[in-house]
Image: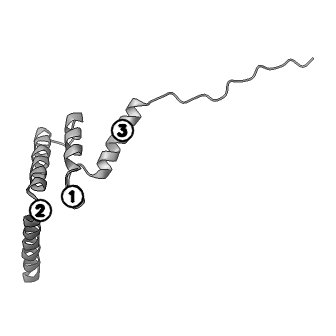
Amino acid sequence: MLVRLTYLIATRIFAWLFLMTRSSATKNVEILILRHELAVLRRQVTTPKPGWPDRALLAALSRLLPRALREHRIVSPRTLLAWHQRLVKQKWTQPPSTGRPPRPRRSAT
């Protein structure tokens, strides 16, 4: 129990020290992302389903965060790829080709 408490306190102290070394622009971007994520989550009772404007804003702002912080957002790189694949799939749906048209049969004479 004491070891766990010591570990938690030490990790918090290191996290605060790391936070102090970051620039204010990075901190402001993270605050904007967290506020927008919170607004999206408050609008929904079940699983978060952000709309297109929400996705665009979160994707744009998440690019400004350091890579280590991007992994802990609801918009991860994997999520962005899934959104892009879904968008392409909806946009470029074509019926499957039936193949080569059949050749006319010749009568055996």
Q: Residue furthest bottom?
A: 3
Cα gap from disc 2 to disc 3, whole angstroms: 35 Å
- The numbered mark, 1 or 3, whose residue comes first in the sequence reads 1
Residue 12 location, quadrant: bottom left
Q: Residue furthest right?
A: 109
Look at the numbered discs 2 and 1 and tell me whether their residues touch, using CB distance below 8 Å.
yes
Q: Nearer the viewer, mark 1 or mark 3?
A: 1
- Which residue is nearer to you in this view: 95 or 2? 95
Q: Which residue is label 3 attached to?
A: 86
Q: Nearer the viewer, mark 2 or mark 3?
A: 2
The three-letter code of the residue at mark 2 reads Arg
Look at the numbered discs 2 and 3 and tell me whether their residues touch, using CB distance below 8 Å.
no
Is any atom of residue 38 visible in this view? yes
At 11% from the left and 62% from the top, the residue drawn is: 22
Say which quadrant the C terminus sits in: top right
Cα gap from disc 1 to disc 3, whole angstroms: 26 Å
Left or right: where 82 falls relative to 21: right
Tell me the SS state at disc 3.
helix
Q: Which residue is label 1 attached to?
A: 66
- Which residue is nearer to you in this view: 34 or 61? 61
At 6% from the left and 75% from the top, the residue drawn is: 9
Residue 51 location, quadrant: top left
Q: How many neighbours does mark 1 have within 10 angstroms: few (below 14), some (14-19), or many (20 or more)?
A: few
The three-letter code of the residue at mark 1 reads Pro
